[in-house]
Image (cartoon, rainbow, N blue to C red):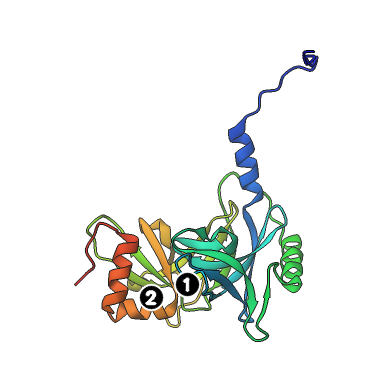
Amino acid sequence: MGIPLSHRPARVIDLDTMRQRQQARKRLVRLAPELDGLEMVYRLPSESEAYYGMPLLAWGLRDDGEVVGLVPWMESLTPCQRLDDPEHGHFIGYRDPETEELFEEPPEHKVLELEQAAAYFEYEETEEATLIQQLPETQGTHALCMDESGAPWQLKQVFGWRLYSDGAIEALLADERLVESTPILPGDACLYPGHSRHRVVYFFQRQIANRIRHEDPATLEALALMVMPDADPPE
């Protein structure tokens, strides 16, 4: 027996529109700094028995209500759940180093903080991306900036982070020529969003940045292989 045909008219499904809607629900709408030392736990595929901890920089609330931990990773301030790479690592969960507790979900106090703040600072949608929040940098994160091919690397300290209405997050870097007073603080005129001037921006924790600054040979070699696989490390 054949299957009877439906009398309802067929609907055309616009997959691109559906993807855009799903992506919009994943955009970040509010940030909260992590100030109690909680960590992201991850492991490397090449070391299946070893686990590593990385301090969380912030927590983010998505448009769909999900809360995620955020770390400076590779080229962006990245939700921990996106760390699922066969080469660079897999996200395991969150950890409180003081109690050594391992947990999968964000702590309730951060969820409540973000929800209350998002409800209080509710922004109207605009056609163009607008700045909705700014966070100070608290971990000494540095950015390795690259411009045109063959141009020298620039290692710069990150001074803050900006969240825009489209969910994009930009690191704030300093134009040393415009520095008028120190310490440099978010809001100073010398600061600019990293990707507004640099073609590529890679983020590193403070200890790795110091090794780069001191020209540690092993670090420079690993760095060259990571960011420019076909290039030789600087001498």
C-alpha span from label 1 to label 2? 8 Å
In the rendered image, the residue lying farthest to the bottom is 98
Figure label count: 2
Mark 2 element type: loop
| Residue 214, above or below 83 | below
- The percent position of residue 126, horizontal first and vertical second, equals 62, 47
Kind of residue indicated by mark 1: Asp
Q: Which quadrant of the figure has residue 175?
A: bottom left
List the residue tagged with mark 1: 188
Q: Where's the C terminus, which quadrant?
A: bottom left
Q: Where's the N terminus, which quadrant?
A: top right
Q: Nearer the viewer, residue 89 or 146?
A: 89
List the residue tagged with mark 2: 179
Mark 1 element type: loop
Q: Nearer the viewer, residue 223 or 164?
A: 223
Q: Is residue 86 visible?
A: yes
Task: Tell me: 185 left or right of 12.
Answer: left
- The percent position of residue 192, horizontal first and vertical second, equals 43, 64
Numbered tag placed on residue 103 in the rendering? none
- The percent position of residue 114, horizontal first and vertical second, equals 71, 66
Kind of residue indicated by mark 2: Val
Q: Say if mark 1 contacts mark 2, CB within 8 Å.
A: yes
- Which is more N-terminal, label 2 or label 1? 2
Q: Residue at x 72, y 19 (%)?
A: 10
- The percent position of residue 28, horizontal first and vertical second, equals 62, 57
In the rendered image, the residue lying farthest to the front is 1
| Residue 33, above or below 131 | below
Q: Residue at x 75, y 63 (%)?
A: 115
| Residue 194, above or below 178 | above
Q: Which quadrant of the figure has residue 158?
A: bottom left
